[in-house]
Amino acid sequence: MSKVAFFQRPRQKIMKIRSITKENFLSVLGDQDKPWQRDYLAMYASQWRGATSDPELMLIPIDDHLVHRGDGVFDVMRCVQGKIYQMEAHLRRLDTSAKAISLDFPPEYEDIKEIIKNLVLIGAEKNCLIRVILSRGPGSFSTNPYDCPSSQIYVNIIRFLGVPERYYEEGISLITSDIPVKKTFFANIKSCNYLPNVLMKKKAVAAGYPYSVALDEHGFLAEGSTENVGVLTKDGVLKFPEFERILSGITVTRVFQLANELLVDGMIRGVDFARISPDEAYQAEEMFLTGTSLGILPVVSYDGRRIGKGVPGPVYTELSSLLWKDMTQNRELLTELDWGS
Ligand SMILES: Cc1ncc(COP(=O)(O)O)c(C=O)c1O
């Protein structure tokens, strides 16, 4: 384009951008309705060494490399009826994720269990989700993690809403996703880079499905956007994909252990981590999704094919009640909080 043509374009009206200062910041924050914040209960940030229950203040600095590079790791656990389920396992996985990307823990991390317990009490909701994020911290806008003098912890608590009850009663429909799975190294880390997972969810929802499952490069079932998958094969073996190409789900690990009870009862013939092809899944007696926020969900249709009898099956029902009992009564896996009387 010649200079003349450029100058001949009509002048754009320049938008007046209002100036935000320390003085007007709080009133600016509060001047919009944000209904999605309704269930935000509490947040801790290590840089303030404090907590807030005001959703307007639940902010992360834009120069934290978590924001502009996804340079951080996280984990999500659940508080059920006032007790935190599997806190140790979730913190262990957070530790593994952080070490995998050489992310040092800030000094405040020493108190992480106390921070979590206190924050849940500040949130004052006995059924909630606890998200712990470890970020590279503020430093610059580059990719260079050495620009960041101190990593940071953010913890937030949101009310547990769960998925619609009919998903458990009627089962859900699942489709195969065409979004490529992450390479092993990245799949095993619960990092704040969830773009493939986001795109999986987006495509599923746009196609009218609540969930989708990705295949690995050999064409075997991998994982959902934030769920693990499993099948009960037609010869009675409960199978879950190996953790090689996926995140090692804490729920699926527990379901696997609990399934041994069904083995003893003779309800299933085996339980295994193994490769599952879509064909094997299409012919399965039952199919499931597992995850922290949904527990275990029955899948009754996969890629438009009916699974089993097309209704939640007996193995699902049994696993679901074993898991719920575990989540509410297994004292070894539950962290008590002091809710007062
Ligand atoms: C990619 C992915 N796979 C599987 C899971 C299920 O893991 P968990 O049972 O520990 O919640 C999650 C949960 O966050 C996930 O993000």
Image (cartoon, rainbow, N blue to C red):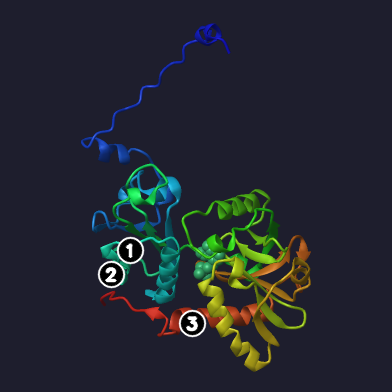
Q: 123 or 302, which lies in front? A: 302
Residues at marks 2 and 1 touching, judged by CB atoms closer than 8 Å: yes
The x and y percentages for residue 292 are 50, 69
Amino acid at circle 1: Phe
- Residue under label 2: 110
Mark with earlier residue (3, 1): 1
**Separation (CA) of disc 3 from disc 1:** 31 Å
Q: Is residue 192 left or right of residue 247?
A: left
Residues at marks 2 and 3 touching, judged by CB atoms closer than 8 Å: no
Give the image quarter of residue 99. Answer: bottom left
Residue placed at 28% from the left, 33% from the top? 20
Residue placed at 28% from the left, 69% from the top? 110
The x and y percentages for residue 214 are 66, 60
The x and y percentages for residue 310 are 74, 70
Which mark is drawn over residue 105? 1
- Secondary structure of the residue carrying tag 1 is loop
